[in-house]
């Protein structure tokens, strides 16, 4: 940066703000043409600029930018203006900046800023209590959501275990055949609730049916699962019907390696 030294001038021509750095370490921000016109208006002069709110507001605005580039504010967390002085300066150029062409000899003026550490706002005990309460509410909310999710997962797991248990019982009991029918009916019910239910005609055909032999019931169950899974695989996960129960039962049946189910089990 240019070497700026204090001089006394009669003329009124401040062209920016600067810090108190020495020599080339000094930083400065030049006024824009519009702001320069405000500072050097007829109503403002060397004697009354401190009583001009618009001038002081401009200095505050430029001080914010100057504080970010100044070497004197590196260790200051929240810099603020401690003092403002109007100083004369000599710029190390043959020609002065465009904003100060009238001072052909290079003599200009700056508002020199002294920075200090600003006052940090203390957090009141009331605010701390409010923050603690908010954190507690958020924590309890997250804990409740986790417990609810765990509960639903546990219910789903228990339901699947119950389905597997029934599919592992005596295949000659009526209870067994009824369970296979109920699984298919439940899946048809879910398909009918989908927005595009009318496009699932083929899949529903494999899931309906009344009384059959045990082997036919088992074959129809696997065919139902395969058709529905193939038809819904491209749907968004949130929109797909739940296949947990029927899949659990199908896996149990395939583990028995029943000859009449071998073709379907290979496709699962």
Image (cartoon, rainbow, N blue to C red):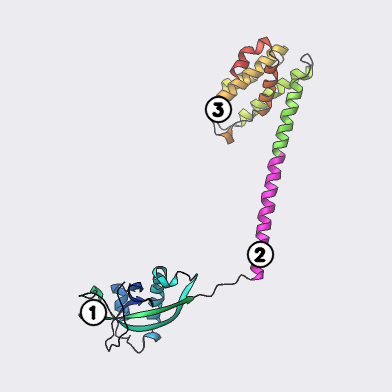
Q: Residues within 10 Å of mark 3 (few under 14, many from 20)?
A: few
**Location of residue 13 in the rendering, given as x and y in whole percent from the top left corner:** 28, 82
**Location of residue 218 in the rendering, given as x and y in whole percent from the top left corner:** 69, 16
**Location of residue 138 in the rendering, given as x and y in whole percent from the top left corner:** 65, 54
Q: Which residue is mark 2?
A: 130
Rounded to the nearest angstrom, the CA distance separating label 3 from label 1 is 79 Å
Q: Earlier in the sequence, mark 1 or mark 2?
A: 1
Tag 1's secondary structure?
loop
> Which residue shows up at 66% across the image and 64% down it?
130
Q: Quadrant of residue 221?
A: top right
**Left or right relative to 196: residue 34:** left
Residue 71 is labelled as none
Q: Which residue is mark 1?
A: 106
Q: Earlier in the sequence, mark 3 or mark 1?
A: 1
Rounded to the nearest angstrom, the CA distance separating label 1 from label 2 is 58 Å
Q: Residues within 10 Å of mark 1 (few under 14, many from 20)?
A: some
């Amino acid at each position: 940066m240019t070497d700026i030294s204090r001089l006394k001038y009669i003329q009124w021509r401040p062209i920016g703000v600067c810090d108190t750095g020495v020599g080339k370490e000094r930083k400065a921000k030049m006024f824009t043409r519009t702001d320069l016109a405000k500072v050097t208006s007829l109503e403002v002069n060397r004697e009354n600029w401190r009583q001009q709110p618009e001038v002081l507001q401009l200095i505050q605005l430029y001080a914010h930018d100057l504080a970010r580039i100044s070497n004197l504010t590196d260790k200051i967390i929240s810099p603020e203006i401690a003092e403002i002085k109007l100083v004369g300066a000599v710029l190390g150029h043959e020609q002065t900046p465009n904003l100060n062409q009238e001072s052909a000899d290079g003599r200009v003026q700056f508002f020199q800023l002294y920075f200090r550490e600003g006052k940090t706002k203390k957090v009141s005990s009331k605010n701390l209590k409010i923050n603690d309460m908010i954190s507690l509410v958020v924590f309890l909310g997250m804990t409740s959501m986790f417990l609810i999710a765990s509960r639903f997962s546990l219910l789903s797991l228990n339901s699947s275990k119950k389905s597997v248990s029934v599919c592992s019982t005596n295949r000659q009991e009526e209870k067994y055949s009824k369970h296979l029918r109920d699984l298919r009916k439940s899946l048809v019910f879910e398909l009918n609730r989908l927005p595009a239910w009318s496009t699932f005609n083929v899949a529903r055909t494999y899931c309906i049916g009344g009384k059959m032999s045990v082997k036919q019931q088992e074959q129809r169950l696997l065919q139902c699962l395969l058709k529905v899974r193939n038809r819904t695989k491209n749907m968004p996960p949130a929109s797909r019907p739940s296949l947990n129960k029927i899949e659990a039962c199908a896996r149990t049946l395939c583990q028995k390696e029943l000859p009449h189910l071998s073709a379907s089990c290979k496709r699962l």
